Image: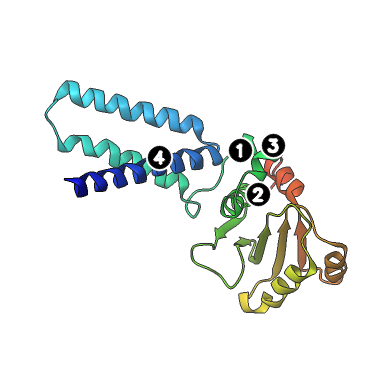
Amino acid sequence: MAKNKGILIALAVVFIKGIFTFIKRVHTAGRTVELFLSSGVLMGTYYALWCVHPSMEWGYIIPVVLYSLYWAYLFSHEKITSVGSNPMWADRSWWWNLDGWEFEEETAKVFRLNGYKAKVTKKTGDGGADIILYKDGIKIAVQCKHYRNPVSVKVARELNGIKDDLKADELLLIASSGVTKSCTEFLSNKPYFKVMDLEDIIRIGLRPISHK
């Protein structure tokens, strides 16, 4: 009996943690409206099913499956491109509250909005790059450093060193707080190596560069 109670408590903790993680990701993605609307549709569907056939047990699984598939589709950064700027992007404190992985995800969305195909590589790995961008036949390897302090030249050297391994045409270092003077000097003769800071990401996220 005690063992079963422990299992139930563990499952409840995992479920509650999952709910909070889901809500946090929804908020991060700026999809709070979709959350309320889809949840309303889910509850309305349950009510309608109960009114039609209160004892239809398996029928209650279908709305949950559809609800899950809907959110899996929205969260799939491989299959969906942004159709508009996330209003949260204008809030710098919001960006600073993101962890490294969330920052990479949101940055990828910004580039998709600007006409790039973007693949976040955290789960699969891609030779040291955090994001791979493709546009007009050009492959760009991106390294993200969401730090409060400027990034040192060491990071730029490391990314530059794997350019050929990644078969990248260009390199992009996204350093939220910019780079050091020595890093700027190192990149001065490398036209294929660009640097962007948080202000740049916010700017092109809120005012996307025109593309066809």
Q: Quadrant of residue 41?
A: top left
Disc ID at residue 19: 4
> Pointer 1 and pointer 4: residues touching (CB < 8 Å)?
no
Secondary element at image label 4: helix
Secondary element at image label 3: helix
Q: Quadrant of residue 143?
A: bottom right
Label 2 sits on residue: 114
* Nearest-to-viewer mark from 1 and 4: 4
What's the image's color scheme? Answer: rainbow
Label 3 sits on residue: 90
* Nearest-to-viewer mark from 2 and 4: 4
Secondary element at image label 2: loop
For marks 2 and 1, give the CA distance: 13 Å
The x, y position of residue 110, in whole percent, is 63, 48
Of label 1 and label 4, which has the lower sequence position? 4
Image quarter (top left, top right, bottom left or bottom right) of the N terminus: top left
Label 1 sits on residue: 86
User: Which residue is rendered at x = 68% and y = 54% of the image?
Assistant: 146
Q: Amino acid at mark 2?
A: Asn
Q: Quadrant of residue 121?
A: bottom right
